[in-house]
Image (cartoon, rainbow, N blue to C red):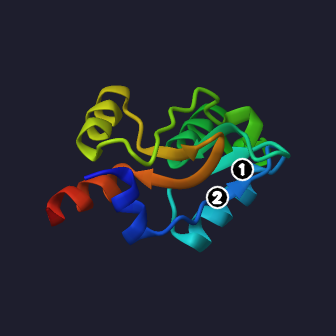
Amino acid sequence: MTVEDVLRDKGHEVHTIGSGASLHEAAGVMLDRNIGALLCVDGSGGIIGILSERDLTRSMAMHGHEAIDRTVSQCMNRDVIACRADDEVGNLLSIMTETRCRHLPVVHEGRVIGLVSIGDLIKAEHRL
């Protein structure tokens, strides 16, 4: 099973946020959309980072109540691991486990075409 199979069931919607947005705004978007991560992209759609629930928690632990006013760019992970639509789900599960990464943007020809979570991939594996 490939990532494309997962996206066919899940959909290709990707939620993004600007690097200058506050963590308060980011947390609100995550809550409203019931998602665990937001991609931060530049003006041409290139990935510059990813902000996860873990990043929000880390910022709160480190900066207390002041964290809520910090910007996405101050807290996001800039070392984004991406995958392709033709990648095998099993291989990605191994990579995500090894790197402790829960979300992977799916990229095709330099363009983001989806975002998969470790939960999405596990669900897909169980449907086999």
- Which of the 4 quarters of the picture holds residue 80? top right
Few, some or many C-alpha atoms within 10 Å of disc 1 (few <14, some 14-19, many ≥20)?
Answer: many
Q: Is residue 51 above or below residue 4?
A: above
Q: Is residue 29 above or below residue 122?
A: below
Which quadrant, please, contains the C terminus?
Answer: bottom left
- Amino acid type assigned to the residue bearing label 2 in the image: Ala
Q: Which mark is residue 23?
A: 1
Callout 2: SS: helix
Looking at the image, which residue is at 46% across and 42% down?
Answer: 84
Mark 2 and mark 1 in contact? Answer it, CB < 8 Å. yes
- Amino acid type assigned to the residue bearing label 1 in the image: Leu
Callout 1: SS: helix
The residue that label 2 is drawn on is 27
Q: CA distance from mark 2 to mark 1?
A: 6 Å
Residue closest to the eye, 125 or 86: 86
Q: Whole-percent x and y of residue 93?
A: 28, 40
Q: Whole-percent x and y of residue 115?
A: 51, 53
Q: Is residue 61 left or right of residue 9?
A: right
